[in-house]
Amino acid sequence: MAVDDTQPLITHLIELRKRLLNCIIAVIVIFLALVYFANDIYQIVSAPLIKQMPLGATMIATDVASPFFTPIKLTFMVSLILSAPVILYQVWAFVAPALYKHERRLIIPLLVSSSLLFYIGMAFAYFVVFPLAFGFLTHTAPEGVLVSTDIASYLNFVMGLFMAFGVAFEVPVAIVLLCWMGVTTPQSLRQKRPYVLVGAFVVGMLLTPPDVFSQTLLAIPMYCLFEVGVFFARFYTGKRRQVDEDEEETTTEE
């Protein structure tokens, strides 16, 4: 391999290192800004459960180091979530030179909408799903059983729900991308509405606690977001192919 052939690879590796460092710096800066408030952040996240617990019941720590490490772990996760727009932008900046002009115009709206939808999904889980789910779970305990949840177990539980609702709310973005790439069409998706509705409830059953409230509260928004995605996807169907052909013709003429 000639020296000139290795230059593009080295350039890409340097650019990749730069983007990764920017992502790491963003996470570290946010983490350092929030770590002092680690206990307060955990108190905010645990508030939906604490409000539903029986009078006199409290959360517990079954591990010696849990009271220290669990809020720190939560703060780090919050830092990752808050830095998601920066991370997505760095990914876009790395791949942008390889994209066509019309593809770059599509990526920015997708990055913004995907970030907003992810945060909206997490907010929906916190303000709507958590109170209903924890109210149901804490009031179904057998008589004589005091509900005292371990703080580490609670963190794992709620982060799983946060991720489930955050990812579920990305359905419109996924549909637009699939239609834009020509994998499917809005017409084909409309014909599959009954299957999508059943699939939404199956996903809700798998990703949420075993109560009908939280399962329904995930399935219904997923299906509504599916309809939103199908509506907007019609504006992108076939657009990529048409623009690609136009650009190829322009390139050939030149």
Image (spheres, grey):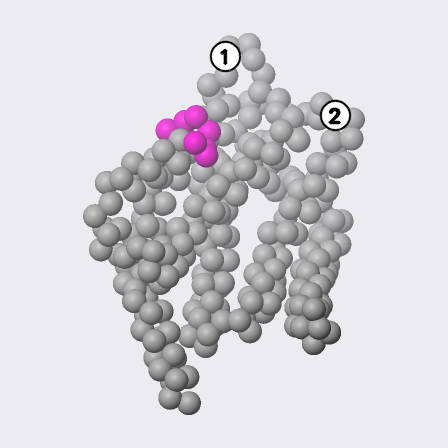
Nearest the eye: 78 or 132: 78
Task: Name the quadrant of the N terminus.
Answer: bottom right
Badge 2 amino acid: Asp
Question: Percent position (x, y) of residue 191?
Answer: 21, 48
Q: Secondary structure at mark 2?
A: loop
Is residue 74 part of the magenta span, yes or no? Answer: no
Q: Which residue is mark 1?
A: 142
The reply to whether residue 87 is visible in this rendering is: yes
Point 52% across, 42% down: residue: 162
Observer able to see residue 176:
no
Residue 178: % across, % down: 37, 56
Name the residue that disc number 2 marks. Answer: 63
Q: From this viewpoint, which residue is outermost toward the bottom?
A: 254
The front one of 111 and 135 is 111
* Picture layout, residue 48 above or below residue 91: above
> Residue 163 at x, y = what percent?
52, 43
**Depth check: 7 or 38 in front?**
7
Mark 1 secondary-structure assignment = loop
65 on left or right of 143: right
Q: Which residue lies at the image location 47% right of the left edge and 58% below the top edge?
A: 114
Tell which residue pokes out farthest to the top in this image: 144
- Alpha-carbon neighbours of circle 2 within 10 Å: few (<14), some, or many (≥20)? few
The outermost residue toward the front is 1
Span of residues in magenta: 206-212
Give the image location of residue 56, x and y in percent. Answer: 62, 22
- Of callouts 1 and 2, the N-terminal one: 2
Give the vertical position of 254 relative to 133 (above or below).
Answer: below
Whether the residues at callouts 1 and 2 have beta carbons within 8 Å, the answer is no
